[in-house]
Image: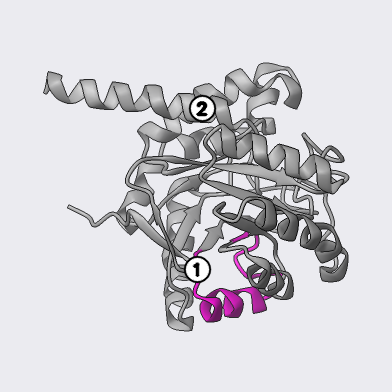
């Protein structure tokens, strides 16, 4: 029987993951695939943060750079000019809220934590700026280790795997050794749906998520309104909530502990109903 980590030390705040939780997405970008341009103004960003918190978000993930396929890496100063004022405003308005910074840059991560963020979400696994790993180690905040084949600008060019889930597990085991040796503490795993993966890869991965349980670490999934949902259904991101919810049930059944989403209420309700299934199924055994 493997050990499962159910708490995170988020800058002195203890986060409980004994039951699944929801990370709400707050993109302050002009070009994100679903909500680009909606929340660049401080007032709109604050209103959205308040809405997500009221709907039960465990954490607000604030990002200033799109990582959609084809996106270019933003320079740190431009990124900070977008996210810095929003982090400060959210922390001031909602001091008890848990804030995550979605960045690939060490300097942005350090500034964000100094401003009140308590979790680092890095899509690049330190490949773009190794300084972000040093930041996670020295700041003693949880770090999201995500798998991506390639970089956003080329990741969908021609992704290839022998066995997508086992290949990613190998990657995680290798990177965990590196991160532990650097002194990174709490680590969350994200298999990176849509990041250097074909439609078929994504569904093979979703059906095999439980292989990551052997690490004992919390698993985060980002499926919300992604192309793996809407391309399969022949729609667009704006019509992908039903499909997202369906996939969230599978992710929860496979051991996901954090759902990273645009639609907090829907994800919370999904978790609530999944928990009922789990609780009642124990009576049948």
Question: Dot 2: what SS?
Answer: helix
Q: Classify mark 2: residues with Cα within 10 Å, few (<14), some (14-19) or many (20+).
A: some
Residue 141 vs 41, above or below: the answer is below
Give percent across and percent down for residue 129: 70, 74
Give percent across and percent down for residue 98: 55, 54
Q: Mark 1 points at which residue?
A: 11
**Magenta-tinted stretch:** 120-142
Residue visible at 67% across and 33% down in the picture: 226
The residue nearer to you, when weighing 88 against 215, is: 88
Q: Classify mark 1: residues with Cα within 10 Å, few (<14), some (14-19) or many (20+).
A: some
Residue visible at 52% across and 49% down in the picture: 191
Residue 110 vs 82, above or below: the answer is below
Give percent across and percent down for residue 187: 45, 63
Give percent across and percent down for residue 115: 68, 68
Q: Which of marks 1 and 2 is nearer the N terminus?
A: 1
Question: Is the C terminus in the top left, top right, bottom left or bottom right quadrant?
Answer: top left
Which of the labelled discs sits on residue 247, or is there none?
Answer: 2
């Amino acid at each position: 029987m493997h050990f499962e980590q159910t708490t995170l030390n988020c800058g002195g705040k203890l986060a409980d993951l004994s039951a699944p939780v929801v990370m709400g997405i707050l993109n302050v970008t002009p070009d994100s695939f679903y909500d680009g341009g909606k929340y660049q103004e401080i007032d709109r960003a604050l209103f959205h943060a308040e809405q997500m918190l009221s709907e039960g978000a465990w954490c607000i993930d604030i990002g200033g750079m799109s990582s959609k396929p084809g996106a270019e890496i933003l320079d740190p100063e431009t990124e900070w000019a977008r996210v810095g004022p929003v982090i400060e405003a959210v922390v001031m308005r909602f001091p008890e809220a848990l804030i995550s910074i979605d960045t690939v840059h060490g300097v942005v991560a350090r500034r964000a934590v100094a401003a009140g963020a308590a979790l680092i979400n890095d899509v690049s696994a330190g490949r773009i700026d190794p300084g972000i790993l040093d930041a996670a180690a020295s700041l003693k905040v949880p770090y999201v280790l995500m798998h991506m084949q390639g970089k956003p600008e080329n990741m969908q060019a021609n992704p290839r795997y022998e066995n997508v889930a086992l290949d990613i597990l190998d990657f995680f085991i290798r990177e965990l050794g590196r991160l532990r040796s650097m002194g990174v503490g709490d680590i969350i795993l994200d298999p990176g749906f849509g990041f250097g993966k074909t439609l078929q890869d994504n569904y093979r991965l979703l059906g095999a998520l439980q292989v990551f349980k052997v690490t004992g670490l919390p698993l985060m999934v980002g499926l919300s309104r992604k192309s793996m949902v809407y391309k399969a259904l022949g729609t667009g991101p704006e019509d992908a909530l039903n499909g997202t919810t369906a996939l969230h049930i599978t992710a929860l059944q496979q051991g996901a502990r954090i759902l990273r989403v645009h639609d907090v209420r829907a994800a919370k309700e999904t978790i609530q109903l999944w928990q009922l299934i789990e609780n009642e199924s124990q009576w049948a055994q």
